[in-house]
Image (cartoon, helix red, strand yellow):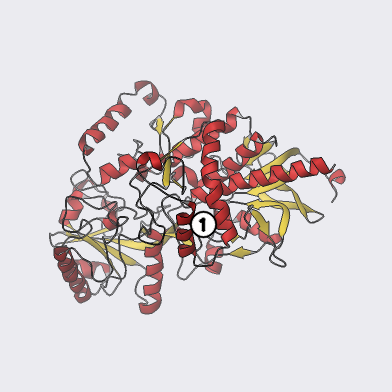
Amino acid sequence: MSESARNWDERFDVIVVGSGAGGMTAALRSQALGLSSVVLEKTDRYGGTTAVSGGGIWIPCNDQIPGVGGSDSYEEALAYMRHLTAGEVPESRIAAYLRAAPEMVRVLASEADVHFRAVRKYPDYFPDAPGGKPGYRTMEPAAFDAAQLGPLFDELREPYAGTQLMGRISMDQVEAHTLFTKGKGWIRLTLGMMWRYWTDFRWRRRTKRDRRLTLGQALVASLRAALQRHQVPVQLNTALVSLVEEGGRVVGVEVDGPNGRRALQARRGVVLATGGFESNQAMREQYLPAPTQAEWTAAPGFNHGEGIRAGQALGADCDFMHLTWGTPTVHMPGVTPQPGLFVERALPGSLMVNQRGERFCNEAGPYTEVVYAIYRNHEATGACVPCWFIFDGRFRKNYPAGPTLPGSIQPDRKLPQEWWDKVIYRADSLPALAAKIGVDATGLQASIERMAQHAERGVDSEFGKGGNVFDRYYSDPSVGPNPCLGPIEKPPFYALRVDPGEIGTKGGLVTDEQARVLRQADGQAIPGLYAVGNCSAAVMGRTYAGPGATLGPAMTFGYIAAQDIAREAQAQREAA
């Protein structure tokens, strides 16, 4: 149907589908470049998966690195990415990301008042790889006062309770690290955070949610405030039905919302930022390793792959559909999303075992690598889905574990009764615990005896736990000689069932260095169509470079997409 024959309900230069950080960055930059833009969000809350995330962005060569005592170079970052992606990602995409990422951060700060700070001690996930770094590259969003959002705050997707102190008090990455590792001044920090929250009487009368937003909440809030200042509309409860193509070019979208079906014209381009497909059981079974269950995910339950399917309907190519941003999750029947095991795996006095009672990985390693190890072991043994996180009474007293706070704060008697033998298992002896959870007792005993030997020597000769600066980031520095290793010997003994979950899927529409979606048939760009974030094939390939390596590329390619749309618009104006 030609444009003259179609009745468009609304017209914009750029339509962005999805309200996470990548989508909002694309819309914000488009508007700044003189292109009218809109953000469409299918749920009644904006922020997408970003709002419940850590909010970090992985930005090699960011401007703040020298100021926090580090150094970096494009050549080092490229060598690191080449090593990790192993030729599976076109170098043109990697180069585009590395060159544009620092610029994106700079422009957001100067033009949109969206600010980040480099985290000095947060390491790359593979710090010993060529070009890896012990910190500096990850940036976290500056804290944001929720009052600046006014009534828009009520539409911001709420954070996960597990990312907050006592389930409601915001903490940033640096504060979280200090608290989890009981670093210097952690008691004073805890008391200060609690005092600030509880004495904010005016805000408490409005809501239990913290006024001080951090992590993904701060990132989304700062971007949403910038969209408001730049008069970019955000339409909630507006779901993508299909892309509209005319003459081989994407010219708009059909959506469904409170006012029924509508057609929205995109005069310059459509940017898909709709997330992955982790909550779509049919797509999981079609693409992901088996077994797989949507209930295992640590992501919110609204990502069903709509953007990917819309692109496929136009002949778009896809890649990495078998991969996820994996994280082990704690099995909690009837609870979604499930809590991820991000921190506790690195702490001493714990290990992970399969149903034979055997260890199968470096528990403190990057969470995506742990999930890969679960599936490798399951393929070999048939006994690793589910697997088990085992710890003793000393660990239970001192550290968090899945949904539980340290026993010194939340003793066993205060845990919900319905959790026992469904979420958390306890026994006075290892054989009794093994019987409860269906794990081979002899194998478990042997694994725990070897862990005690590793802890005494300070070297995990099986899997290298605690062998690099990333492993030790969330360890207990008061424990030696290896802060990630400790014996499991003090009863009672505990277990959590662990599933191979994820924070999102990696696979999606194949894009080029300009974030343009490519056709499967000929590898050429589909005019007018862009994709960023988890609905696009990950620039990280199968792996995970460091904290923020999901949001960093999502925002950077959102920025790149807007730049490319503006360049094309300018070229068309000049040609006319």
- Say how many tags the image has: 1
Quadrant hosting residue 429: bottom left
Q: Give the amino acid type for the residue marked by disc 1 in the picture.
A: Ser
The answer to which of 467 and 384 lies nearer the viewer is 467
Judge whether residue 51 can be spotted in this image. Answer: yes
Q: Secondary structure at mark 1?
A: loop
Residue at (57, 61) in percent of width and height: 91
Q: Is residue 340 above or below residue 353?
A: above
> Looking at the picture, how far across and down is residue 262, in whole percent?
73, 43
- Residue extending furthest toward the top: 202
Q: Is residue 87 left or right of residue 461?
A: right
Q: Nearer the viewer, residue 429 or 457?
A: 457
Instruction: Determine the image quadrant of residue 215.
Output: top left
- Crowding around mark 1 (Cα neighbors within 10 Å: few <14, some 14 to 19, many 20+) is many
The answer to whether residue 294 is visible is no
What residue is at 68 percent from the left and 66 percent from the top?
520
According to the picture, the residue beneath numbered tag 1 turns out to be 279
Q: Could you tell me which residue is drawn at 36 percent across and 74 percent down?
A: 377
Q: Is residue 339 above or below residue 224?
A: below
Image location (x, y in percent) of residue 441: 20, 73
Please determine whether, in this image, residue 9 is positioned above or below residue 497.
above
Residue 346, x across and y down, in percent: 27, 57
